[in-house]
Amino acid sequence: MESLPLHICHVQTLSIFVNRSHALIHSIALACLIYYRASFLFEDKDPKTKDTPLILPWLLVFASELLLSFIWLLGQAYRWRPVTRTVFPERLTDDDKLPPIDVFICTTDPNKEPTIGVMNTVLSAMALDYPPEKLHVYLSDDGGSPITLHGMKEACWFARWWLPFCRRYRIKTRSPEAYFSTSKDGDEGSGSSEFITERQKIKERYEVFMKSITEVRQRGEPVDGSRITSRNHPSVIEAVASELPESPLVDCSSSFPASSPLLVAAASVVTDLD
């Protein structure tokens, strides 16, 4: 017995007709324009006229129009056959039959990639609507920043309240920063006094979480007092949230540029490659 499809694809016939008609008319106009530009370059000119200085601007305009036409042509691919899909999440298999997944998040410099933003990404991944025992989140920090490692530990602390809150009330926006920045509540139980009270408590803990990372960032000092730099540091692999079976989280730090966490796990001593 074949299983039911998880989604159904609907072809937008009217949109196809409109998009392709527009593309045809636009293509004819472009062909006429290109013919006009090219005919000017190859037409016989009177040697007595002094129009040579006009050739260079004409060539520049012609080249620009060819480039823009090519860019327009590339943009027609997703308009050629627009579709919509109706999904059926209730047809998914049981949790015990779903495959395990690993989420890899890469960062390198807390100065260019704010630690709070990276930690919000980590928390969003940890709060995915997926069986917790089959979800693993890895953070690869190529800069080996102690600030990032400190942020991971703070994120682990905040996740103790954030993850149960998301699952209990089926929060749709799983990034704390995005969730608390909006006043719209379309989640289950959002009108109850219990939800409002718990939401306020979670928000206060999130503010403590941000304050801890910001203070360390402003001091500009290694959290452990060492002199570790982005160009000179050992490899670090630390299971930050191994005590949380519902949200396993691993932090990996290495100086390999754009290194994969799997490679980092195999490295015992890392030296500066720059």
Image (cartoon, rainbow, N blue to C red):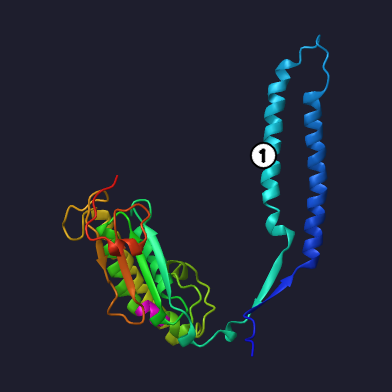
Kindly identify which residue carries mark 1: 67
Q: For residue 69, which quarter of the picture?
A: top right
Residue at 50%, 71% (x, y): give it: 183
Farthest residue, direction left? 225
212 with respect to 132 (left or right): left
Q: Classify the position of the N terminus by image quarter.
A: bottom right
**Quick check: is 59 in the magenta stretch?**
no
Q: Percent from the top left, x then y, of residue 205? A: 33, 73
Q: Percent from the top left, x then y, of residue 225? A: 16, 57
Secondary structure type for disc 1: helix
Q: Classify the position of the C terminus by image quarter.
A: top left
Farthest residue, direction front? 1
Residue 191 visible in rendering: yes
Q: Percent from the top left, x then y, of residue 2? A: 64, 87
**Three-letter amino acid code of the residue under disc 1:** Leu
Q: Main secondary structure of the magenta part?
A: helix
Return the residue nearer the eye: 272 or 27.
Answer: 272
Return the residue nearer the eye: 87 or 171.
Answer: 87
Return the residue nearer the eye: 120 or 204.
Answer: 120
Say few, some or many: other residues with alpha carbon within 10 Å of mark 1 (under 14 / 14 to 19 / 20 or more). Answer: few
Return the residue nearer the eye: 180 or 216.
Answer: 216
From which residue to which does the magenta span run? 161-165
Q: For residue 199, which quarter of the picture?
A: bottom left
